Image: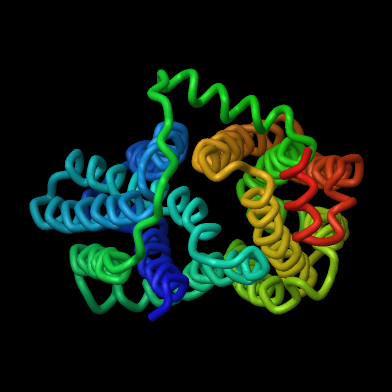
Amino acid sequence: MRALDRLVASSYGLNIADQIALVAVPIVAATVFGASASTIGLLVACQSMAHLVGSLPFGVLVDRTEPRSAVLASALLSLGGFAAAALAIGAGAILPFAGAIALAGLGIVLYGLASLSMLPRIVAQADLARANAAISLPRSVASLAVPLALGLMLDVTGAAAVFWFAGACALSALILTAPLPKSVSRPQQREALIRRLAKGAGFVLRHPMLLPITFCAVFWNFAFAMLVVLAVPVITQDHGGEATLFAGAMAAFGLASVAGTYVAGRIAGRIAPRLVLMFGPGSSVVAAAMLLALPQGNPGPLLMAAFFVLGFGPSMWLVTQNTVRQLVTPAQMLGRVNAVIQTAIYGTRPLGALAGGAIATAVTPQAGLAVVAALFALSFAVVLASRLTTVADYGALAIAEETA
């Protein structure tokens, strides 16, 4: 089995495990532990905060260690976390369950950073875009399939069994990544953590392509977090629909993510990357316009279509911008650069959720939806005003940045 195939297969294991935790934690909290809404929120935060707490230090770790070792460590962390979560459920211990979920989340964060840094070392530059699509597809597939399957699993098995299954997925990732080849790392000077992080952040802020990628992602994720909060009130209060329509909309979003990631891999090298970099945020503006035009009484069909558009273009954009990031960033700095961008993105999500709730309460959910549309438009404007519109070829981009 090729190194890329092993990495992709391990990505399926860890992304399925991550999605299991994402969907199961609030259900298990309510049904097993009898948790209140505020306690459920804290448990979900334990999982999501892993991105904020772990991204920056893990970015430094990935740059300072051999990538294969970081990938193996991530699988071990996740395996330990999911196994501990299953044991905590059996013991009825909610605090250890919270800690175990946080530990598993840290493993997922480390894996994401390590795998992105490892890809340029195990595939040729010409194959990098297709490799990014291949390693992104498992997340999209898991986001679609796991919620559907988990509803059945929780009915026929115990909650602990679900987390043992997640642990088995993490174990499969560990077994698959163990034979990955080691790569030779350049010796680096020992520097303080803050100084190394500052260098990574400075590189992003000074770079004419990484900076607009970051701002585009920040505006888009802020808007999407708002939309998740606003969707049900908009559907039920403003358009007379059923709240369950939101579940269908998210399924359409997941299906579109799978399709968009697959298409991004198929067209890599056939069309100019700049077209995809513009299409992703541009299609989000179209989706927002569709949401603003939802009809009264029967919003379902247009709602599903809007969420499909919202999942398709941005998933293609994600694959393409990952490739741009890898090509324009020095290998010894890739972990920190990815960590800085990831922290900026995930840091906006809780802020976007809070903003969505505040606007819906102070004004109306429909007013919040107008803000969402404006933020999607702003993410598109950032791309249009940047050098991302000049990326005609990955090879030329890499050469240009190398000689700059």
Query: In which quadrant is the C terminus drawn?
Result: top right
Q: Residue at x 58, y 69 (%)?
A: 131
Find residue 146 and report its image quarter: bottom left
Is 338 in front, or is 290? 338
Measured as percent of width and height from the top left, residue 160 is found at 19, 63
Measured as percent of width and height from the top left, residue 314 is found at 72, 59
For residue 229, side relative to residue 369 (left or right): left
Find residue 214 and report its image quarter: top right
Find residue 164 and report its image quarter: bottom left
Q: Is residue 49 in view from this perspective?
A: no
Q: Residue at x 47, y 56 (%)?
A: 118
Is 123 in front, or is 318? 123
Q: Is residue 348 above or below residue 24?
A: above
Measured as percent of width and height from the top left, residue 370 is found at 83, 43
For residue 352, side relative to residue 234 (left or right): left
Q: Is residue 67 in view from this perspective?
A: yes
Q: Residue at x 73, y 52 (%)?
A: 398
Measured as percent of width and height from the top left, residue 9 is found at 40, 74
Colour mapping used in the image? rainbow
For residue 375, side relative to residue 249 (left or right): right
Q: Residue at x 22, y 49 (%)?
A: 33
Number of numbered tags placed on the structure image: 0
Is 93 in front, or is 378? 378
For residue 297, side relative to residue 52 (left or right): right
Q: Is residue 164 above or below residue 105?
A: below
Query: In which quadrant is the N terminus drawn?
Result: bottom left
